[in-house]
Image: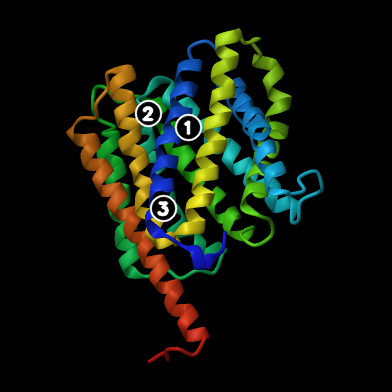
Amino acid sequence: MHNNKKNPLIGMGLMMLAMVLVPILDLFAKLLSADYAVIEITWARFVFHGLWLLPLLTWKGIVWWKMPPQPVYQLMRSLMLTATTVSFFFAIKDNPIPTALTLLFISPLIVAVIAPLWLGETFDALRGIAVVCGFLGVVVVLRPNAEDFSPSILWALVAGVGYAFYIMFTRKLSSSSPPLLTLFYTAIGGVLVLTPFVGVVWVTPDAKGLLMMASMGLFAALGHFFIIMACEYATASQLSPFNYFEIVAATVISYFVFDFFPDIYVWGGIAIICCSGAYVSWRELQLSRRARAVADGRIEIL
């Protein structure tokens, strides 16, 4: 796919499809957590994720069996996504998926704070205000003084921090390998990281459990594949607002499967966090475009 074939509507459609598929992965993880340990569920998610990616890599003619470039960054990226997935699965084991997912979306705000120190990116007062508003949204969702507050939901915040570092390692690797290959390396890294621990909690899955684990990997592979495809049809600025459609899909799934619908506080927190995160992403794109324009001599710094 070449850039001259960009079609934003197709890209947006693919992104929305991906955001529908990914919560199904979370649904299977939550259902499996009633019978299997989170570590085993996460291990299976990465095993089947990697297995389902192999046909796609073969179809694309991508060599996957060689040592990846920048192996340390690849390993750290895998470690961050593994920590994120384990933490998120712990969160949704005893809490509604939409609530945990809302807290996971603090990741753009974490990136906005850390990236200037680590990646040398800019940080301004407007993004600082957005970050503060986003964390106020977190407090609205958590309501730590409420009677129904569950400490296990804090795992979702850990997942959000882990995902922020995953995003930053992804930026470091953005030009080192094809996205699909990097995704495969991430799955392999997750398997390597978790294999030493899975034996301690291992429960041999029955046919139903094995099918659900395989489905987790399938939906993970398909969801990420459609995200990659969406990026070939549309720009990041066109696609970024559709990331938050995942919350809508997760809410619909949770309503029909678990009879759960977020209350007004969670919806309020969703609105604050999503608006703050979307603004941070938009502001970052605007500043990066301006920086490129200055570098190309198209505009002058006044």
Residue 161 image point, x, y percent: 48, 45
The tag earlier along the polypeptide, 2 or 3, is 3
| Disc 3: which residue | 10
User: What percent of the width, then of the height, locates residue 105?
Assistant: 39, 45
Give the SS element for disc 3: helix
Local secondary structure at mark 1: helix
Question: Along the polypeptide, which appears first: circle 1 or circle 2?
Answer: 1
Q: Residue 97 — which label?
A: 2
**What amino acid is found at the position of numbered circle 3 in the picture?**
Ile
**Which image quadrant is residue 18 in?**
top left
* Tag 2–tag 3 contact (CB < 8 Å): no
Q: Quadrant of the N terminus?
A: bottom right
The one nearer the camera, 267 or 118, is 267
Q: Nearer the viewer, mark 1 or mark 2?
A: 2
Alpha-carbon span between mark 1 and mark 2: 9 Å
Please give the count of numbered marks on the rendered protein. Answer: 3
The part of the image, by quadrant, that contains residue 263 is top left
Q: Which mark is residue 88?
A: 1
Residue name at image x 60 percent, y 15 percent:
210
Percent x, y of residue 255: 28, 23
Judged by depth in the image, the label closer to the viewer, 2 or 3, is 3
